[in-house]
Image (cartoon, rainbow, N blue to C red):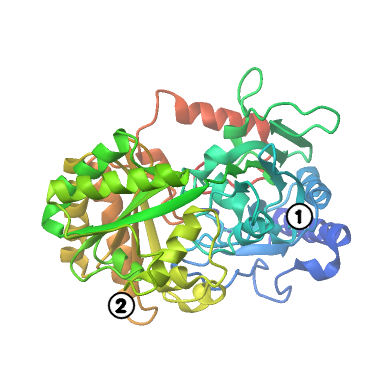
Amino acid sequence: MTVLPEAGTRHEASAFDRLRAVLAGAAQVVGADRVTRPDEGAPGAPVTTLGPNAGLHRSRAVFGVVRPHTAEEVRRVVELFAAEETTAVLHAFSTGGNWGLGSREPAQDGAVVLDLSGLDQIRDIDVARGWAVVEPGVTQARLARLLEGSERMLNVTASSAHTSVVGNALDRGVGLRHQRVEDLTGLEVVLPDGELIRVGWWPEQDRPTPVYTHGLGPSLVQLFVQSALGVVTAATVRLLPRPEALRVVRLDFTPDKVEAATAEVRRWVTQGLARGVVKIYNEVAARAYGGEPGRYLVHVCVDGTPEVVDALSGILTVEAFRSRLFSAVSDSDATDPAAAHHDVAVRVERAYAGDPDPTDALFEAKTGRPAVRLDEEGGFLFFLPLVPFSGASLARADELVEQVRAETGIRCGVTLNVLGADVVDCVVTMRFARDGEEAERAHRALDRLYELFAGEGFVPYRLDIDHTDWVGRLPAGAGARAFAQRLKDAVDPHHVIAAGRYA
């Protein structure tokens, strides 16, 4: 944590004077109405906060907020901070919808916040070749709406339709087709000295080069994923081919069959019977999707030509009944208006087809609040480990979640996102009341989840702002952490960019 110095010494006063001067310079760059400065009359160091957050994480003390409109404004603001030794570092966020992990908050105290939601341009798009250049403030709803009726679609997430495409991809969020980091082909980045560069594949006006992320030599796109090496101001993202037909097969099973049923689902995945990310919900998480009480729920997407969809859904139905592991199997909920889960099934299938629900009905069912009110009213935490895709490992993960419930009284929702034949993204969610001791119990539960899952080798792939120390506690390749720090020191020797959650 950055410890804020007490004002009083000449050096400290000089540092704060320089900070005030830099913020004044930022106001000249972006406009005075787009810079929020703390109360100058406050005792000690002038600081403020960003307001409440859905996880009830401690609000970090910040020295101000700057809201640029363009990449050039970002570059000039970073350049101002690079030129002066101030008491602040720069923390950037896209739209702030990082609920359950810290929302808009920096990981440490003492930052000036760059709110990039004003960078909201879709700069360029080529549907035929399958790419779009978007800025951090572009939401998945907006980009998906632009693609309606076309041959391409966006890999959308199950989060709010109004979240950032770029921000989620940079934090390795999971879409309904695959991890979103796989959709990043190029990045525009402002380095800590104010230089603006582009890495990876970028469209060229005079020649249609094939879309290829890695280029020649070391691939640089991944350097800026979950990193503190610069401020991303735009990204080239892949647009996926839209299937001719799509269907989601819905199944459920009882908790005593977790090991056998998930092993059967893995067999389907390894044999190519599923498309996109298979999703398995425990009985708590299944409620938002109309799951039957006391049962796990499975969504298996199949797509392709109409004939392929008919064939695959028929095969899955036969396999499910033959296994005798599933209590109910249906592939027609979205097409049958009389089906009990018709409305939910329609929303689920549309999401797999790249069309997020702008009303956020399923998102609100999961979080308990609309996106615009979640930080102010909701109570919501995430824990995101990776678990081997085997029936035994997933059954063990289920046992660990039950152990946490027994110890803390917190019932966790669990969504298993199948990322391939060998790994599952295990999304553990905790909803809690903001008043009383339930929030404290939820945070104790989160601490225990980190400890128990890591003890089994099920390590997180995303961190919240209160568990950044786990970067150093989890195993890495020999010398990897030290090398990453050497890169940071070389690229950002004056520590202009905040360390973030993964430094």
Q: Is residue 412 left or right of residue 261?
A: right
Q: Is residue 10 left or right of residue 425?
A: right
Please, which residue is most extreme toward the top here?
A: 217
Q: Which residue is mark 2?
A: 437
Q: Residue 82, located in which quarter of the rendered image?
A: top right
Distance from disc 1 to disc 2, alpha carbons, whole Å, reads 43 Å
Q: Position of residue 312 (x, y in %)?
A: 34, 43
Q: Secondary structure at mark 2?
A: loop
How packed is label 1: few (under 14 Cα within 10 Å), some, or many (20 or more)? some
Identify which residue is drawn at 57% across, 74% down.
372
Numbered label attached to residue 265 = none
Please name the amino acid that badge 1 sits on: Gln
Q: Position of residue 92 (x, y in %)?
A: 65, 53
In the image, 2 versus 370, the foreground residue is: 370
Please name the amino acid that badge 2 sits on: Glu
Q: Which residue is mark 1?
A: 121
In the image, 454 versus 97, the foreground residue is: 97
